[in-house]
């Protein structure tokens, strides 16, 4: 049977996942060298791993770290998580002790645009339904802790406002892990004196919370407590930055994370261990899984495959400039996922015309991939391009992509993991093995002690390919205050559209001669970085006209349908 026939007859992702015979999670952990005493099981097929394990394995050498990123996303699809899972399975089949370290899906996009985010086809992580829904409750812990701090702030003001908090300058909003545009801007405290002090505020989606970043970057509960205490919640009427620690509930916030801080271990369809913990949305957050999950994996595997959100201009840049800098990680190679279809879309073809061969569009679209290859190389890392296979791809198109990648000094391989699982990733695994043996000169792109404008300008020019950055009047005012309070000596987390290298989602391919406008600067002192919001990027998404939730259902016996 030919490839496209197989694809047309394949079951849905959830059908494949539900038919899988998953091993008991203690067996998966044991095969990885993790003693059962470190596991806190959530049923038969998932568990949390005690953070004590990191302390007990401190002297063990680390395995090789492979980052999976992608070209600039398009509606045509790229398949980053699917490739990550398939690559991990392929490396396992090659005889390597392998693990994956991935991000948790967020309920907002699961019920909104995506429908699920645990891989696809025969390159999935299971139990898929649990992972895509409540999983082990990590995001609920973040939501609760975040909102506890918000409630404590309003209560402090109600009870006399000893800190002299300026109600007009409270920067700590509330969060919800669902897409709900109606909550972007709200007024609280209405109804009279007994109900609080009226003020404007709003909601972000949970994964945009600074507490998400703190969970992903913390090395343990003590570190987490310190980070939570450093959160800047707003400013006094005299202009002083006020920290969460001054509200007096840092201990309570930390205890809400006593379980959430522990990485989760699950498995692929082929039994490769996967640590899933925190971190989606690299367009509004740093978009990486937790440091602890990555470090756990590195202690027990020869090869660790991890991923960062969206294209290399977002997730990969933040992984390398923020996560690796703060956690002292040194990756060994980077995989860039692309599809011929997406490249043609970057070359100007409409989504409805992607099945036809158009070499001119493909050549034009290749400019986007070329930029991402160059970006990886700017960090001193070897790049491997994974071309995610589609039945409409022709030999002429695939040969062209391969030739262009080789000219740029990148390895390239056809990936068929969606249809064939680990077997379909053999060629990719070989290229990754080769890349890891190449010279590695990993370095970050900017000095975190430089001025904020300099750091952002470096990202815009070097990573996005723009000609500079513009600050709005409001952002300039925030910049002056941040510098005055000495809060500027931290890495930058750019909040930018994922659909373009620029801050304009309409500019596909490789735009040039553009500027990026920063309209707001937020200090995430607990996480240890500064967020720069650009363009019209939103930290609370809305639902589309036909949300993915409309396709979902559950039977009397608990079987879920329509989840991807």
Image: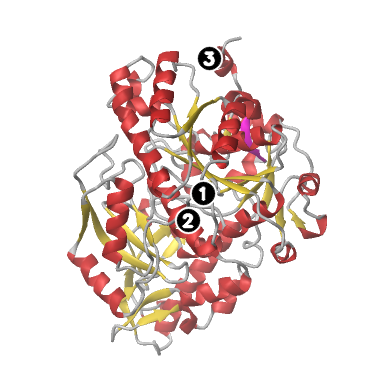
- Colouring scheme applied when the structure was drawn: secondary structure
Q: Is any part of residue 332 visible from this angle?
A: yes
Mark closer to the chain start, 1 or 3: 3
Q: The residue tagged with tag 3: helix, strand or loop?
A: helix
Is the Cβ of the residue at disc 2 closer than 8 Å to that at disc 3?
Answer: no
Q: Is residue 200 left or right of residue 279?
A: left
Q: CA distance from mark 1 to mark 2?
A: 7 Å
Q: Which residue is mark 1?
A: 106
Query: Image point 29% across, 84% down: which residue?
Result: 237
Q: The residue tagged with tag 2: helix, strand or loop?
A: helix
- Looking at the picture, how far across and down is residue 345, in whole percent? 33, 27
Mark closer to the chain start, 2 or 3: 3
Magenta part, dominant SS = strand
Query: Image point 47% across, 44% down: which residue?
Result: 109
State which region is magenta.
122-126
Mark closer to the chain start, 1 or 2: 1
Which label was assigned to residue 4? Answer: 3
Q: CA distance from mark 2 to mark 3?
A: 37 Å
123 in magenta: yes
- 262 or 130: nearer the eye? 262
- Looking at the picture, how far across and down is residue 85, in whole percent? 60, 37
- Looking at the picture, how far across and down is residue 28, in whole percent? 77, 44
Observer-side mark, 2 or 3, equals 3
Within 10 Å of the Cα at label 3, are there few (<14), some (14-19), or many (20+) other Cα atoms? few
Q: Which residue is mark 2?
A: 207
């Amino acid at each position: 049977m030919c490839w496209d026939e197989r694809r047309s007859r394949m079951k849905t992702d959830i059908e494949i996942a539900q038919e899988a015979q998953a091993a008991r999670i203690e067996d998966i952990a044991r095969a990885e060298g993790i003693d059962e005493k470190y596991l806190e099981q959530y049923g038969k097929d998932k568990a949390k791993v005690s953070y004590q394990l990191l302390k007990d394995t401190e002297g063990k050498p680390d395995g090789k770290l492979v980052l999976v990123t992608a070209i600039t996303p398009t509606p045509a699809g790229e398949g980053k998580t699917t490739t990550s899972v398939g690559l991990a399975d392929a490396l396992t089949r090659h005889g390597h002790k392998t693990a994956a370290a991935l991000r948790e899906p967020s309920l907002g996009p699961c019920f909104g645009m995506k429908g699920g985010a645990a891989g696809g086809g025969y390159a999935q992580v299971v139990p898929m339904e649990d992972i895509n829904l409540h999983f082990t409750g990590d995001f609920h812990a973040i939501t609760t802790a975040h909102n506890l701090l918000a409630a404590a702030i309003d209560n402090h003001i109600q009870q006399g406002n000893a800190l002299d908090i300026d109600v007009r300058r409270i920067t700590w909003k509330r969060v919800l892990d669902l897409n709900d545009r109606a909550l972007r801007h709200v007024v609280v405290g209405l109804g009279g004196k007994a109900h609080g002090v009226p003020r404007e505020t709003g909601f972000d989606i949970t994964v945009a919370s600074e507490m998400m970043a703190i969970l992903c970057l913390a090395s343990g509960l003590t570190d987490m407590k310190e980070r939570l205490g450093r959160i800047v919640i707003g400013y006094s009427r005299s202009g002083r930055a006020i920290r969460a620690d001054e509200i007096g509930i840092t201990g309570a916030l930390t205890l809400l994370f006593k379980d959430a801080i522990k990485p989760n271990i699950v498995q692929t369809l082929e039994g490769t261990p996967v640590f899933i913990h925190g971190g989606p949305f690299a367009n509004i957050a740093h978009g990486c899984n937790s440091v602890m999950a990555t470090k756990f994996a590195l202690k027990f595997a020869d090869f660790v495959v991890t991923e960062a959100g969206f294209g290399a201009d977002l997730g990969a840049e933040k992984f390398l400039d923020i996560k690796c800098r703060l956690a002292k990680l040194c990756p060994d190679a980077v995989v860039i996922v692309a599809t011929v279809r997406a490249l043609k879309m970057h070359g100007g073809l409409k989504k409805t015309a992607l099945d036809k061969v158009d070499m001119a569009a493909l050549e034009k679209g290749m400019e986007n991939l070329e930029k991402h290859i160059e970006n990886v190389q700017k960090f001193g890392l070897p790049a491997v391009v994974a071309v995610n296979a589609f039945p409409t791809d022709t030999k002429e198109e695939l040969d062209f992509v391969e030739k262009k990648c080789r000219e740029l000094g990148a390895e390239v391989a056809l990936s068929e993991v969606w249809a064939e699982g680990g077997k379909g990733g053999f060629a990719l695994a070989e290229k990754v093995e080769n890349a890891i043996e190449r010279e590695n000169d990993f370095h970050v792109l900017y000095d975190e002690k430089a001025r904020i404008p300099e750091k952002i300008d470096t990202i815009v020019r070097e990573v996005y390919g723009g000609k500079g950055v513009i600050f709005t009047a409001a952002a300039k005012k925030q910049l002056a205050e941040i510098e005055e309070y000495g809060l500027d000596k931290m890495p930058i987390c750019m909040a930018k559209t994922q659909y373009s290298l620029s801050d304009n989602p309409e500019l596909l391919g490789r735009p040039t001669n553009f500027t990026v406008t920063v309209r707001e600067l937020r200090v995430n002192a607990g996480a240890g970085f500064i967020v720069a919001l650009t363009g019209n990027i939103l930290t609370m998404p809305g639902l589309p006209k036909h949300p993915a939730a409309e396709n979902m259902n559950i039977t009397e016996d608990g079987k879920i349908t329509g989840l991807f």
